[in-house]
Every structure is written in structure tokens, then in C-alpha cells.
Image: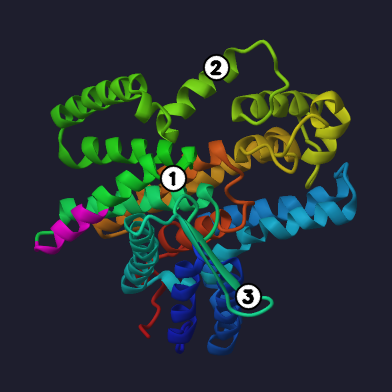
Amino acid sequence: MLIKNNKISINLLLLAVASIPVSVGLMNSFFLLSLIFVFLSNDVRVYFLKSLGNTMVRSSLILWFLFCVGLFWSITDINDALIYLKKYSVLLFPFLFSPLMTEKSNRKKLIDWFMGSMTLILFITYILLLSSQDSFYIQLNEKIDIAFNVQNGFKSHIITNILMAFFLYLSFLRAIVRTSKIKFFYLFLGILTTHYVFFISAGSTGQIIAIILIFFLLYKLLNKAIFFISLLAFSIFSFMGYSNIELKNKYYFKKIPETLESILTKDRLHLGRRPQLYENAIKIWLDRPLFGTGTGGYNFAFREKLPEIYYKTPGAKRNPHNEYLHFLIQFGVIGFFLLIRLFYKNYTSIKTLKSLEEKNYALGLLIVFLVAAAGNSIIMDSGEGHFWAIMSMAFFAGKRTEELNISKN
């Protein structure tokens, strides 16, 4: 018998996913406790052999081993390289936890707990706005405090708005597919979340993801006529919004013109904008195109190859804010190919899901990961990486119960 009694491990995992947008410390604690109970509750050899039976799990492990091997040709200090190896340890999560998610009921709980956590953040945000406040701070003791901001949530605007974009998708998806009166509740959540994503948060990556997910829903679940009408209406709305002085100050209407301006400008030293970061990253990669700089080599290579730009950069020195470029720089074309292969395995794993609703969850997730990876080092970043790992092990890495002959809890 593979699973004796994993109820405690699963419940701790649910608490971990609910903690992703709230607290890194809580999230890591729940992950660790869940893993401890995995070892206590299972025949470990059989458990991990079953996990290795999935191609997506193996693809994730291959990437992690690449980081291990990359230590031997890393151009940076070994201690710095080990920090990056630790950050990418989330690549082990599908291997460690995916057998817990073979049950459809557990995957449903995972999504429900995630939605509950995001609903709480949304509720707190609008309560603060209605009370004309934008933040609160609570000091529990000398080491533990709680800080919340309407733009950032409990953490940063980047991760909060990426997660909000997926929450928006889930809310509208359930509003479309559910038949009971609860669909109106999900529609209400979707509308509130749309307002948050575009008019409250400063997270441009989340805004781009939300736009793509909304049009994906319109095209896939409704019909082409509605899709094209909505696309036209969105284009007119965006043009009118950019022409409106009040709306022009909103992040959604500021970011696109600023990005275009940063691409066209002759001065390439203003590094706060992603297109210029990517341009510099490509220059760094071209210096070592085949095998890269090794694990964690981006910062060192940036400083050595482009010192005149490096020392004028106010931030963004540790990674290029693009997972594709980060793999390309560290491991050359081989690392880039293996990352693409991982996402491809995500896609091919979707067909193993029996439920149409679950398949739509997984397709939405894949869109989130593909787009977020173009705007952030999503696997490396704490929080974003854990979100990728926990959702991947549920919807891309877990073989179905009937295939593994696993007894129910």
C-alpha cells in the first residue's frame, strides 16, 4: 500500500498553499511539517518510486540536477552559487509531494484553499479602501509582525497581482461552469478582482496575465463572436483610458506607453525597465552561449561584462527578471531547452486529467507560468516559485489514482 494515512500531510499542504500570498515563514513551516509526515506515513521507497513514474516530475528533477552540476563551472563564488541552488530547491517539490495530489478531492481542496486565501486578501483590501486607509501594521512580538498594503497585499505587488490574476480566472471560470446560484457569488468575486488587478495593484505582470486569461476564457468557453467583440471593446477602452488624465495615472495605462518609450529610447542605461534588462541579459548570454555561466553566475557576469551599466543599476542585479533568460545565461541553450521541455511536459500532462473543469484549471495555470516566466524569475522567486511548485505537483505531476492503484485515505 502506497498511502497509509496522509490526511495530516495533505492538510498541512493546504495550509502551505493558503500561506503563499501571506507569509514566507508560515509557508515554509507548513511545507516542512507536511514532508515530515510524508516520511512518517509512507513506505518511502515505494512512495518516491511512484513519484518518479511521472515524466513531468523527472523533467523537474533534471533541472535541479543541472543546478547541482552547474556548481562545477560556475563563474561566481561557491557560497553565492549555493544560494541559487537553495532558491531553486522548489524544483524538488513535485518529486516530494505529487503522490499526495493523486486524489481529485485533494486537488479540489487545494484550489478551494487558494481561493479562500485570495478572497481574504480581497476582503481586507476593500475594507481598508472603504475606511479610507491603505495599510495596517500589527507587531505580535519582537520577531513576528503583520504588514498589509492595498497595493501589495501581505507581500509584494508582483506576487500578489500574479496570484490575483489567476484568482480572477478561477472566479470567472466557476461563474461560467457552475449551474447553482453560487455562480453569481463567483461573478461578484471576479468583478472585484478585475478592479483590483487593473486599478489598485501596481503589478504589471499580473495585469498582462489577467488580460490573456480573460480572452482565453472568452475564446475557449464562450464563442468567437463574443471574443472578437470583447477584444474590440477592450481596445477602445484602453485608448479612451489612456486619453483620460485621471485614468492615465493608473498603473495599467502608464506601463504600456512607458515600456514602449524605454524600448525606443537611445539611452540604454536606465535599467529600471524590463526591456532594457532583457537587452543586457542577452549581451551577457552571448558571451557564453553554449554552457552559460554556471549556477548563479548572472550577477557576477553582469558586473564583469557590463560594469558601466551594473554600477548605475539601482536594483535587479541578482536575476534578469525573466526565467527564460536566467536559464539561458546560467546553462546556455541546454538549460533553456530543458526549461521549455518542463513547460511542455506540463502541457502534455493536462490530458491525464479526467475532469473538464480541472483541465481548464491546468490550462490557466500553464498560461500563468508561461507569461510570468517572461516577466520574472518565477521558479527562483520565493512565493512565486512555491506557487509554481505546489500547483505543478497537483495538476501536472500527479498520476491519477486509478493508474497507480493507490488506495484512498
Q: Residue at x 60, y 83 (%)?
A: 36
In primary-sequence order, the first of circles 1 and 2 is 1
- Mark 3 belongs to which amino acid? Ile
Which residue is labeled 2 in the image? 261
Q: Residue at x 58, y 79 (%)?
A: 140
Magenta range is 180-189
Q: Which residue is drawn at 25% across and 59% down?
A: 355
- Residue labelled with disc 3: 144
Tell me the CA gap for discs 3 and 2. 42 Å
* Residue 286 at x, y percent in the picture: 76, 24
Q: What label does residue 343 carry, if any?
A: none
User: Is 82 left or right of 391, judged from the image as shown?
Assistant: right
- Which quadrant of the structure image shows residue 127? bottom left
Above or below residue 224? Residue 137 is below
Callout 2 secondary element: helix
Kind of residue at badge 1: Ser
Residue 57 in the image: x percent, y percent?
A: 55, 59
Q: Residues within 10 Å of mark 3 (few under 14, many from 20)?
A: few
From the viewer's perspective, is the residue at label 3 or at label 2 nearer? 3
Instruction: Note whether 191 is above or below 311 in the view shown.
Output: below
Q: Is residue 395 visible?
A: yes
Image vertical order of residue 387 relative to residue 144, above or below: above
Q: Which amino acid does label 2 sit on?
A: Glu
Residue indicated by mark 1: 201
